[in-house]
Amino acid sequence: MSITTRRALPVRFTAPAAVVGTLAATLSVAPAEAADAGSRAASVQAPHVRALPFAGSVASAPVRAAAARPSSYTIRPGDTVSSIAAAHGIATADVLAWNGLGWRSVIYPGRTLRLSPAAPAAAPAKPAPAKPSSPKAQTHTVVRGDTVYAIAKKYRTTVSAIMSHNRLSGSAIIRPGQVLRVGAAPASAPAAQLVSAQAPAPAAKPTAKPTSHTVAAGDTLFGIARKHGITVAVLLEANDLGQGSIIYPGQKLRLSAPESSQRSATLNATQKAHAVRIIRIGRELGVPDRGIAIALATAMVESSMRNLDHGDRDSLGLFQQRPSQGWGTAEQITDADRSIRVFYGGRHDPNGGTTRGLLDIPGWQRMSFTGAAQAVQVSAFPHRYGQWERQANRWLDTLR
């Protein structure tokens, strides 16, 4: 998806070998509704970009076994990211993410691209616990009618313990489908002490995440973004930088773009009809409430909940999906029912494995609200989705 980006600082490029901008090739990703992975990098506009001829469809490329695939590839004149991905049987989106590139980034001969994700850092060894091992952690999936008090009583634990384990505030609302961590209380604890009817104690505050990064010698934008769990596009936007901008030791970079407070809106009849359809199809497909709320917020950001016949470049419809990126023909994308199903993806995606919907994103339920929406949309301004989270949940509760 594409949202108009802010004007980047002047950037000077050498002759590009290929442009990722108008990918004629479509993505081919096998649905994986419950696996684990990271999100894709967001797109950033590159100036004076010339589209190259059709590079072939990723879907038609033979899939090469991961064991036989090289870990890197040196770019040659005429290469495109999509042709490199197709030749090695992997998704273009993954190559972009592994190398900190956007959909319109420029690549150059002689540069080396990663063809596999970076190996995760080894976890530090944990000291042996001083106390005897406690019962294994348990989880509880919230069903309609559940309360934190009832869940605590069922698992012989305390309300405050559940609030602390799940970082819930005293006013937090639990929703059907939400997975909560619960723990068994000691067997010797009297029943009267297991659950308190009093107001729960406030949850322990998590360690505050850094809001800025001071550039050290050898730092790169990609390395800084990966270290702090954000995308290069967010880093660029937060610091008003352009693709290819130079950073220097001692420079202080913000790690998040300024976000306004939560947004709200009153839907007219047409917008409400689209919101109801998004909810109905989500329920039909068995999408958890959080996934439906993500779809509502995404449609509001992309089209103001309208089925548009225009948009940035060739973007169309409720979710501003693009024919040039394999989301379907213009007629298919402006079919609201089909467009919603393609956004959700999964086993019943009418687009098959050509594109990657929400249910196809590995580990999407463990991502932030913004991160899950961004993994599907690949926007230059991903923080905008989170601004509609509260309103999307209100629509989910009130619209039928």
Image: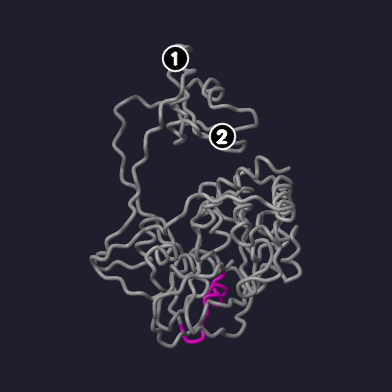
Residue 230 coordinates in the image, percent (x, y): 42, 58
Residue 234 coordinates in the image, percent (x, y): 43, 62
User: From mark 2 to mark 1, how far is it between C-alphas?
Assistant: 23 Å
* Image position of 21 (left or right of 158): right
* Image position of 291 (left or right of 71): right
Q: Relative to residue 156, is residue 6 depicted above or below? A: below
- Which residue is depicted at the point 51% across and 47% down? 366
Which range is magenta?
76-90
- Residue holding disc 2: 174
Q: Relative to residue 256, is residue 153 depicted above or below? A: above
Q: Which mark is residue 193?
A: 1
Q: Quadrant of residue 12?
A: bottom left
Q: Looking at the image, can residue 277 be seen?
A: yes
Q: Quadrant of the C terminus?
A: top right
Foreground pick, 373 / 3: 3
- Which residue is depicted at the point 70% across and 48% down? 279
